[in-house]
Image: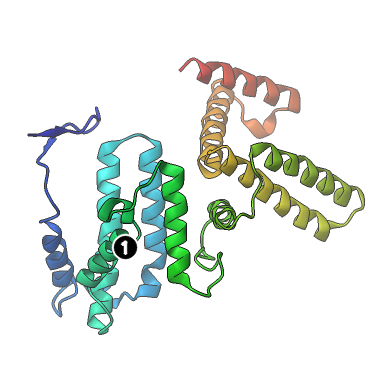
Amino acid sequence: MRLRLPDPLFSCYVEPVNGETLPRLVEVMRRLLAEDGCPWDREQTPASLTPYVVEEAFEVVDAIDRNSPAALREELGDLLFQVVFLSELMSRAEGFDIDDVIAGVCAKMERRHPWVFGDLKMEDADAAIRGWEAMKAEERGQRGALDGVPMALPPLLRAIRVGDKAASVGYDWPDASGARGKVDEELRELDQAIAAGDDAAAERELGDLLFALASFARKRRMDPSAALRHTLDRFTDRFAHAERAAADRGTTLHELDAEALDALWEEAKRALSKS
């Protein structure tokens, strides 16, 4: 049986496999880190690789957003390379190796899915999520419910994860209307702080407003980060269209007045809505 990648930019056939090729990547990594390997790779540390891990993760997300299996395959490879790279560096520091990483995550998945690998029955996805969180809480012991949320997460994603964790112990609105009401409340408080000329308070209220919006998105099962990315994509496309339209008329955006800029923007919206 062959699987076709449904991407017009990348047409090929891929034989289904069971992960047998992972050792090849480990071998490539070890060759790069050998004494006669790549000088740059040999200088890296877990700390120096941090920005690359973050960048590759975002490029995976970008490939998903673009609905491109070809790009997703490539970006997943780049992200996997970072996992193997870090594991091999830790192996050389007598910490752990890639086999320990794989064994650990397999054991965790099996342990936290007793409704799959055991006899426990689960009614639906919501029940599975509650079961997952219960398993994590049991493993966590005396740790706080929010301790597992990385501080380094992008703020909108961190807001969603904090909300999820708080909800797992009952600290949440019963439905989206409560979160929506909180948006109005925080917006009023932001307006009050601005009217009072209190910049510090306004910044705090702006943060509260953004958190409320993220909570509303979470309750509505929407991804606020994706929503913002899509808005930025639309803005970027419209802005570029306006720039080109201005250039076609022998001028630039900064030479136009507000009325002309608005006209170009509306023209861009109309043009791109048809594409």
Q: Residues within 10 Å of mark 1 (few under 14, many from 20)?
A: some
Query: Which quadrant does the N terminus fall into?
Result: top left
Q: Residue furthest bottom?
A: 94
Closest to the observer, 201 or 100? 100
The residue carrying mark 1 is: 111
Above or below residue 35? Residue 131 is above
Q: Quick check: 27 left or right of 158?
A: left
Query: Which quadrant does the C terminus fall into?
Result: top left
Above or below residue 251? Residue 45 is below
Check the image and tell me how it is coloured.
rainbow
Closest to the observer, 63 or 114? 114
Closest to the observer, 142 or 103? 142
Q: Residue at x 69, y 36 (%)?
A: 177
To which quarter of the image does residue 243 belong? top right
Q: Residue furthest right?
A: 196
Q: Residue at x 38, y 46 (%)?
A: 122
Q: Residue at x 23, y 81 (%)?
A: 92
What kind of residue is marked 1? Answer: Arg
Residue 126 lies, in percent from the top left, at 46, 44
Residue 246 lies, in percent from the top left, at 59, 24
